Amino acid sequence: MARIAAAIKPLPLNIMASPDLPSIEALQQYGVRRVSAGSTIAQAALGCTSRIAAGFLAGATSEMFGAIMEYGAMNELFAKSARD
């Protein structure tokens, strides 16, 4: 990655996140300027939703209530984006 970053300088080197990547700090040392999550965050959210929904349908609610974002904090996220 460091050789690629040097070869394309001043253009930024952007990397797609994957499980086997070095740490963000190491990537920065290699010259990576941006790490993209791509669809991974949405996939993780849907995976979590699927597990919680299956548990709920099976009669388990403890995981569902343990994974929530407090309503006020969630509402504040929408208020911030409306002001920006």
Image (cartoon, rainbow, N blue to C red):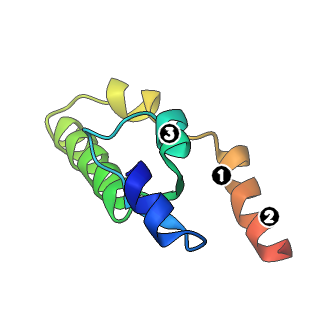
In the image, residue 58 sits, relative to residue 47, either above or below, namely above
The residue at the point 53 percent across, 51 percent down is 31
Tell me the residue that label 1 is attached to. 74
Could you classify mark 1 by the number of other residues whose Cα lies within 10 Å: few (under 14), some (14-19), or many (20 or more)? few
Q: Are marks 2 and 3 in contact (CB under 8 Å)?
A: no
Q: Nearer the viewer, mark 2 or mark 3?
A: 3
Tell me the residue that label 3 is attached to. 24
Q: Disc 2 marks which amino acid?
A: Lys
Q: Secondary structure at mark 1?
A: helix
Q: Nearer the viewer, mark 3 or mark 1?
A: 3
Q: Disc 1 marks which amino acid?
A: Met
Picture quadrant where residue 67 is located? top left
Numbered badge on residue 80: 2
In the image, residue 8 sits, relative to residue 25, either above or below, namely below
The residue at the point 35 percent across, 24 percent down is 62
Where does the image place residue 12, in percent across and percent down from the top left?
55, 68
Residues under labels 1 and 2: Cα distance?
A: 10 Å
Q: Disc 3 marks which amino acid?
A: Ile
Residue 84 left/right relative to 49: right
